[in-house]
Image (tube, rainbow, N blue to C red):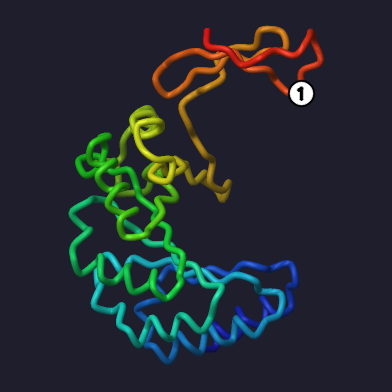
């Protein structure tokens, strides 16, 4: 509790903090009483607008998501939750029930997935996972490139593989099922989004764009000042 009090005191004294994430270790491994105490203390801080929980518990310990817990969490809205899924085999009936309870409590759910060699590094598996998440009211949020940490080499794929997967999702399914592919930059650089290149070239005041199917389109750049207005056309 001493460390928590110190952190809460810092947040109270720093009005620029509007968003607080509870994560690492998993906050849903706390008892209901401790979790309620922590959320209540944070909710009393006027400038904290948003509370978030980062948790793997619904995927690995779905029985923890009890009706009692969801009633507790519902008291502290606006409350969001970031879940962690890596493979469609995790989407069991028990997990579906757990996510359903959280969704019924009005908690927006997002999923963070790590790209792992030998686990989910192909379009078919990733599409199945993303579609399954949406049926549970979990919005695919981030697809992470596996960090270059000690012991992870056998799980790491190339960045080209991640771009290939995004290319295989975008345009072939609903946009809700396409996460943002990111690298968490070493040294605290933050999340850097990656996507297949769409701008092919510029032709005067027109951009030449490539869509998901590889077709090229000419599109007027609204910031361009050269020439007359141009209507969008396919190349």
Closer to the camera, 109 or 44?
109
Residue 26, position in %: x, y?
A: 38, 72
Can residue 199 be seen here? yes
As drawn, 218 above or below 44:
above
The answer to whether one can see residue 148 in this image is: no
Q: Residue at x 39, y 88 (%)?
A: 32
SS label for mark 1: loop
Residue visible at 44% across and 89% down? Answer: 34
Q: In the figure, 23 relative to 138: above or below?
A: below
The residue that disc 1 covers is 223
Q: Where is residue 47 in the image (x, y as percent from the top left)?
A: 71, 74
Find residue 187 and report its horizontal and vertical position in percent. Answer: 55, 48
**Image coords of residue 225 (percent x, y):** 81, 15
Horizontally, residue 185 falls left or right of residue 69, namely right
Choose top left, top right, bottom left or bottom right for residue 207: top right
Apparent side of residue 193 relative to residue 28 in the rendered image (left or right): right
Up-down: is 230 above or below 132?
Answer: above
């Amino acid at each position: 509790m001493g460390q928590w009090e110190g952190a809460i005191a810092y947040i109270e004294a720093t009005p620029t903090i509007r968003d607080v994430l509870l994560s690492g270790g998993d906050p849903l491994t706390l008892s209901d009483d401790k979790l309620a105490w922590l959320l209540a203390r944070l909710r009393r801080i006027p400038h904290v607008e948003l509370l978030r929980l980062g948790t793997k518990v619904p995927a690995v310990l779905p029985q923890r998501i009890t009706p009692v817990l969801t009633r507790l969490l519902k008291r502290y809205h606006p409350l969001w939750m970031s879940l962690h899924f890596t493979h469609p085999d995790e989407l069991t009936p028990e997990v579906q029930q757990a996510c359903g309870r959280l969704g019924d409590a009005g908690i927006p759910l997002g999923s963070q997935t790590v790209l792992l060699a030998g686990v989910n590094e192909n379009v078919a598996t990733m599409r199945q996972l993303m579609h399954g998440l949406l049926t549970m009211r979990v919005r695919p949020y981030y697809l992470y490139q596996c960090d270059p940490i000690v012991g992870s080499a056998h799980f790491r794929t190339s960045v080209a593989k991640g771009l290939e997967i995004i290319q295989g999702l975008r345009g072939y399914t609903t946009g809700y099922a396409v996460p943002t592919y990111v690298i968490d930059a070493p040294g605290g650089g933050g999340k850097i989004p990656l996507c297949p290149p769409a701008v092919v070239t510029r032709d005067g005041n027109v951009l030449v764009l490539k869509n998901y199917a590889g077709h090229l389109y000419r599109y007027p750049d609204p910031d361009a000042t050269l020439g007359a207005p141009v209507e969008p056309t396919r190349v």
